[in-house]
Image: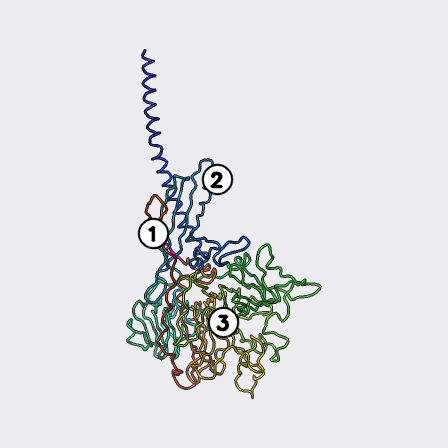
Amino acid sequence: MVVVAFVVMLSIFGGVMVNSIVKNDPILTQASIQRYAYRALASGLNAYQNAINANPYLAACNSSANYSVGPPATGSPQCAGLNYQTWSVVPGTDVGNGVIPEYYKFDNPVSVKDATSAIKYLEVQIVGAAGFPGKNVFYSTVARFTPQNGFLNGVWWSNYESSEFPTGTATDCDYFYNQGRNLNGNQVGGTPCNAVSFISGDNLFGPVYSNDSLYISGSPVFSGTVNTADPNCLFVNDGIGADDKPACSGLDAGNYTAAGSGFGHVKEPLPVDNSQLAAIAKQGGCYYVGPTTVTLSVVGGVGKMTVTSADTISIAGVDQMNLPVVNPNSCPTNGIGNLPQNGVVYVDQGPALAYNALTNPNGYRAGANPFDSTANPYASQIQTNCPNCYYGASGTADNEADAFVSGSLSGHLTIAANNNVIIDGKLTYNDCTWAGTASQSLCNYNSALTGTNDTLGLIANNYVEVNRPLDNTTLGFFSGPPQTLPACGTGGALPAPLCDPSTATGSAGAQGLTIDATLLGLKQSFVVNNYDAQGREGQLTVYGSIQQNARGPVGTFGGSGTGYLKYYLWDPRLTLYGPPYYLTPGTASWALDSSAETYTGKEPSCPPPQATPSPLPAPTFPIAGSTAAGTGSCTAAS
């Protein structure tokens, strides 16, 4: 009887437990699904941040531009890799056998701008979900991402404000504030690293940053904040070596925005090289070796590029660098073709030995460098009679990793070179261009619904340089100083790069050359070749952003002056997106600033697609005239 009673008691107690578990099963299941839904939301946050850091232009895409690679391809190719308003399964949660599936979805991004129309942050509603039909649970958040890379947040970024051209390297230099602000005192080796100054007639519209001291002479225009790592002051007057006061009361810095400016900032790091872009170019981009000429154009509203790359083609006339199994697009090597699918062109070092039909059939070709044309009546422009026709030409220029770039771009493109990028003609955007006149407005930001944001990045391991070739037939004791070759397109002018790309009419303030691009010299500088040769080239207009390790001169001042005056205007669209993979060599482009999760129990409503903001106002500052600083024969670099 005791045993029977004990068994009966256990049965009753077990039944109570089973009944309790059965009754609470929906609660337990619901709690598990909620946890999985929250995990899916976290996966969505990570996936979105990783995607826009790998390709910043994806932040400008939306559901209407989602790219489908299946035939026929739809949407924008630049939006490939991220779909908006479409559910994506979290990897590993769709394997069956009772695993609860997890999903996430991104709504169209919304950019929030400040009073200057620069991007303050990007807001994206992200939804995480888990469960089976009838038992789905949703979590949502509005995530705020802020731009992090200082390179694209201003018109000017520099590591050193000095140079020792044409033979020195930035490794021989130190920061001026570590050397007592001596104009010629910041060298580590025996070669002086001379300060390069901003001068009267120079115009910088946008934020400015330098890890070094900024030198000015006269009244350059700084229409924006100025920040440096110099622990003492913003500006140094290169005439008297005086420090400026924090409020700029000691020096005339032209139009200067004191609010938000400062000195003593922590130095910002510089990427080591651009080698990562070579691998990206081999996977859906265009990869070339040896001197490569890229001329951009627009045909029927579609961006094209005409490429000449003699060393990329094998002896059989086949492009062995861009095989179809790697690159679905055909990369032109001696003609016109499409822009690469992922938007990256990389020019690498060519073969080490010269071509020989018997011993080295795949060697580099003589004449591969466009300066070394057999039709050049000025003999070799590379080494013999014109050693500084472009910087960084060492050894045999016919196999160097140099890209020669010009033309008009429609689309999104990054051109990177293991050595130098030489700009040998006007570079303009097709959607809009800035000519340096107050009557024009800045380029408007377009979402993928409303149009294309043309964007071009030029990234050189060494120099990004503006071509200014000399006529070496004028060299000699009785010939006087060397003259530049005739302007491109004029009578008697040879094709680029054996012509002067400037369109100046002779006056110092005239329009000389327009460059719509973002420029980065990782180990060296942005510079004008032969900047100190006789003659003014007018105004060098850069619409975008300039970043460089050492400060490259574009002209000289004092006396008659040479080369270009600066008119640099920041493209505020760059805070939202950069050229394809432009930020990969640098720091992360976007950081998750905040997010607020809310459990709703059902899929939340989504904000409307982003509207197109109004055009930005044009700067009201006039283009300064050719006010010379100093007298006599002083030709300090500027």
Q: Where is residue 612 in the image (x, y as percent from the top left)?
A: 39, 63
Could one spot residue 513 in this view of the protein?
Answer: yes
| Majority secondary structure of magenta residues | strand
N-terminal of the pair, mark 3 or mark 2, is 2
Q: Which amino acid does label 2 sit on?
A: Val
Name the residue tied to disc 2: 95
Mark 2 or mark 1, which is nearer the start of the sequence?
A: 2
Q: Distance between the residues labelled 3 and 2?
A: 51 Å
* Mark 1 secondary-structure assignment: loop
Residue bearing the label numbered 3 = 427
Q: Give the range drawn in magenta.
A: 590-595
Disc number placed over residue 583 in the picture, else none: none
In the visual, does 515 lie left or right of 117? right
Residue 591 colored magenta?
Answer: yes
Q: Where is residue 86 in the image (x, y as percent from the top left)?
A: 44, 50
Residue furthest bottom in the image = 478
**Secondary structure found at label 2:** loop
* CA distance for labels 1 and 2: 30 Å
The numbered dot on residue 595 is 1
Q: Which of 99 and 401 is in front in this view?
A: 99
Q: Position of residue 583 (x, y in %)?
A: 45, 60
Labelled pair 1, 2 in contact (Cβ < 8 Å): no
